[in-house]
Amino acid sequence: MIKRNHKTLVFIPAVISLSLVILAGCGPQSFKITPVPSDRTLEESVLIDEGGLLAPKIALIDVEGVIMNRERGGFLSDGEHPVSLLVEKLDKAAKDKSVKALVLRINSPGGSVTASDIMYSEVLRFKEETKGKRPVVAVLSDVAASGGYYIACAADEIVAHPTTVTGSIGVIMQMVNFSGTMSKIGVKADAITSGKMKDAGSPLREMKPEEREVFQSLVNQFYDRFVDVVATGRAKLTAEQVRQIADGRVWSAQQAVELGMIDRIGTLRDAFTSLKDQLGIKKAKVVTYHRPLGWKPNIYAESPAGQPQV
């Protein structure tokens, strides 16, 4: 038996009202229930069709947001694994013989070392599988820093918008130390480990010199790999020259051109025009790949991933 009193009667309407406010937002809302296809294989959308019978295709593939080697979910939306999604798109483009070139639009502040390296390697694999006959151009958007620039170095050419921020060549391993705060409240950590390095990097105490040496060695190795990637992708730069500019800072598009980090400043449409000239064609179709229901209306449409920041 449920007892009802005036408090209960007041509380329930209040909860309902709050729910309506949360759901309503700032105005009337409507909901559409759409059947989701069981087959989630990537579909192709034509973003630009310049006409012509069996016109060659230029595939546009986005690399956006924080680069990570795990699924990236979203509110009320299916998550995607950035590495897996890129590989899936590259494979689809490689299998389509009518795709004659590839444009990587990069809008990323960077991310994990491994994810960036895998995506870089997969772009190289695409070039190997297509025997170098399909040029790859990286077009840098708002930000193409750190891991974003790492991936761009796999392209045959790098084009940046006039307002692009790029570079940030370097590696960071961020540590924190709460021992000072813990001492003020009378808390002390006491770890039992199987080896002296097992709790290295613990935020509950100060880092020991020998631990710092171990972590610095790892960072140096990852940094050397990054330098090699840039030097390999940028024919005009030697490894020593890369090290001179690879202090972690970011550069404007104009600075990047002068340093040899990118080839030229231009727009996405400039890249398409240049590719057509390179391929010796007058008309082409620009296509992109997406999940079913993920319709793309034009070359500037992309899934929301938040504003990339440096």
Image (spheres, rainbow, N blue to C red):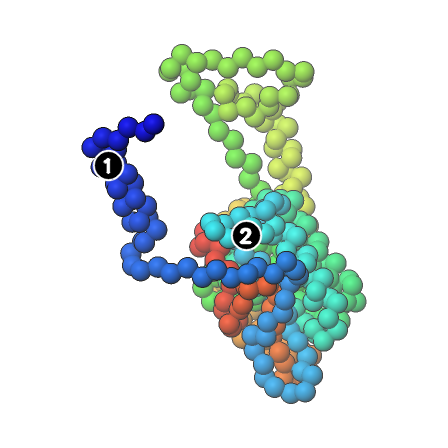
Residue 121 placed where, x, y %? 71, 54
Residue 309 placed where, x, y %? 45, 51
Q: Which mark is residue 9?
A: 1
Q: Is residue 157 visible?
A: no
> With respect to residue 143, does 2 lie above or below?
above
From the image, which quarter does the N terminus lie in? top left
Q: Residue furthest left?
A: 6
Asked whether, in this view, residue 240 is left or right of residue 306, the answer is right
- What is the three-letter code of the residue carrying label 1? Leu
Residue 223 placed where, x, y %? 63, 43
Q: Which residue is at a point 66% across and 49% down the rendered structure image?
A: 117
Q: Residue furthest bottom?
A: 52
Task: Single out the mark in the foreground, 2 or 1.
Answer: 1
Q: Nearer the viewer, residue 179 or 11?
A: 11
Q: Which residue is at a point 57% across and 59% down the rendered structure image?
A: 36
Q: Which residue is at a point 55% across and 48% down the rendered structure image?
A: 72
Q: Residues within 10 Å of mark 1 (few under 14, many from 20)?
A: few
The quarter holding residue 8 reads: top left
> With respect to residue 53, does 45 lie above or below?
above
Q: Nearer the viewer, residue 242 or 213?
A: 213
Q: Which mark is residue 78?
A: 2
Q: Is residue 88 visible?
A: yes
Q: Residues within 10 Å of mark 2 (few under 14, many from 20)?
A: few
The secondary structure type at the circle numbered 1 is: helix
- What is the three-letter code of the residue carrying label 2? Asp
Residue 282 placed where, x, y %? 64, 86
Mark 2 near mark 1, Cβ–Cβ under 8 Å?
Answer: no
Asked whether, in this view, residue 140 is left or right of residue 42, the answer is left
> With respect to residue 32, does 211 lie above or below?
above
